[in-house]
Image (tube, rainbow, N blue to C red):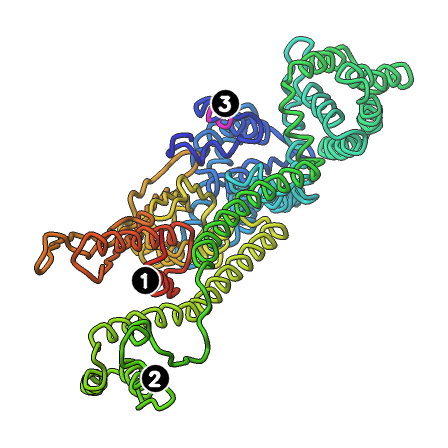
Amino acid sequence: MANIETISEKTILHGIKDGFSIKRISLIIHLSFLLLALFLSQTVMFDAAVPFLLPLWAIVRQRYENEKAWVLIGGMVGAVSLGLGQVLILGLQLVIFELFTRFRYWKLPTSFAVAVAILIGQFAWQTAIHFSFPPFIIQLYIYYEVVLAFFMTIFVQLFFVQPHQFWTKSWNYERVGAGLVILAMALTGMNSIVVSYFGLAPFVMHSAILIAAYAGGVPISATIAIIVGSLVGISELSFTGMIAVYGLTGVVAGLFTGLGRFGVVIGSLVPSVFFFFYDTTLPLDTVYFVSILVAGVAFFAIPQYVFNFLQNIIHPKRDEILIQRQEWVTENTKAKLETFQNFVEFLKELVFDRFTSIEPVKTVRKIEPSATCMSCFRYDRCWGSKGNGMDELIENWFIAKSGVKKAEQTMAEEKIKLKCVKSTKLLEELDYQLYNDKINGEFYHGKKMIALQLKDLSNHLNKLMKEMESETITFKTIEDELYQQLKTAQVQCFQIDILNNTIGERDIICSIAKKHKTYEEQHLLCERILLPILYEVFAEPFQVEKIVDQKQPFAHLQIRFRSAVRYQMDYDIYSKAKNSWVSGDTHAVFHIHPGLVAVMLSDGMGQNREAQRESRRLVRLMRECLSYNMNPRQPCIHYTMLCRSIVK
């Protein structure tokens, strides 16, 4: 896992190369904005209007705060090449735009603010230069510049989305078109950069066609070549045959993609050679051919992972994504089925294997002579043909024992003692029969317990199937669910990192837009919005561990949350039997997970070692139940206690 402070910055270029260091990524970004501002500030439309630097500045100051200095430096350097007056005009427009954006009581949309700033700045400068209201042709150029700046602001806003979304956001037609317009305007500004026989504009144009042809084929390369070539020709007021050269270059280069990079480069040279002999009026000179040759050599030096990334953007590999999702679902389902199988085996051992040996109880009790009566010399008198009601006395004794009144039980025993000469042994034998009857009666009660366990088993299976169905249809992760909850709460969270998802030990980092500057505002955001959302999603309390104010790659807040264990338990156990050294009571205190503690106390129903062993067996059995996700509210404790004589 990367360092927490650099997670957001790595997302800007994560799609190109994961091996880039953060410093190298930052340097690439800085130089890109510097060069873009330099070329846009040198772009002259209709030989008079220079409208494209202020739109770039307007969007950069809103979304790319760390790049403002680089855009300003590049823009001023480009403006110096056009003259000192252009530097002063640009500075005046920047000041007016900043005044508009900082005005508290009236906020203009960005496009209108840029247009109004250029309009006021140019009119103020031209009026000061001419010492009067500027002439009509100057006003016309000013209006051209205002309209172009207005639309250019929209294009820059469409292309330069939020930094964390630059590679992940969809590349729709509007965004691609906006990027082509920006590229065309930058190429117009590059026309003045020529070193010996090397020209920057044809080099960049040809490189763009080669990359588009190799990554996207004929449609992409031809579209880019024709659109960019047309825009460059219009900006220079020279709608010439170079559009045909660019368009045919894109088509032929795309047709040779099957031969690899070498075929693309050779195919891109054919149209230029053809038009060199076909139309001598085209500017296909030595500078042009040297520039495209250098572009072909540089094309071979581009790493393959760049083209893989571009191909994935243009033609996403949906099949591979579906296969990966299917493999993930299969593995997850297999793990859940293994857990379910263990649960079934445990329940089978608990309910069936241990308790099916019990013989069923008879539904109707029949009073018969006991072994004590059979061996007694007064058997005929009590149970013979002229019996004197011993069966009735025994039946009344069973009825009294099933009740709770001690007086009735004592009276029934006294009647038997008056009638029977071996009353002590008879009562012992009756107690044994009553005990067996109770055990057999609990067997029928155990049937109800089995039904409850089977119900729990059914619920477990239904829950498993619903989760499998949900995962198969939606592939929804917990990060997506949390992101949607934050989005519903109007929290601009652009990245969520779940470092640990263990219950009671969760560790989550949320990167959100920096709208709350003071510590009190940040604290209120966490307490009133973020913490309740986390509790709703994960069903456990959280606490804010740290809030970090990040500047790279743009200003944002990184808030780290951890599971909050909001209790502390201290306990002492005192165990002592009343008249014995051995206590039948047993206890157990253990963690189910870091946020939940189970406390068990079992009464052994005795003061000897057998009671202690029974009690320990019960605690161990209940602990196994909890380890297999059995509902602890099921009455299995009562069931196992009733069958404690059989549990082994």
Report the quarter where the N terminus lies: top left
Q: Secondary structure at mark 3?
A: loop
Position in image of residue 251 (x %, y %) = 83, 27
Q: Amino acid at mark 3?
A: Phe
Q: Amino acid at mark 1?
A: Met
Mark 3 vs 1: CB contact within 8 A:
no
Report the disc number at residue 641. Answer: 1
**Residue matched to label 3:** 20
Q: Is residue 377 above or below residue 155?
A: below
Could you tell me how far apart the alpha carbons at marks 2 and 3 are, in whole angstroms?
102 Å
Mark 2 vs 1: CB contact within 8 A:
no
Residue 439 in magenta stretch: no
**Residue matched to label 2:** 383
Q: Nearer the viewer, residue 204 or 324?
A: 324
Q: Is residue 393 above or below residue 480?
A: below
Residue lying at 48% horizontally and 59% vertically, measured from the top left:
488
Q: Point out the tag, 2 or 1, that comes first from the N-terminus.
A: 2
Give the residues in magenta.
Answer: 26-30
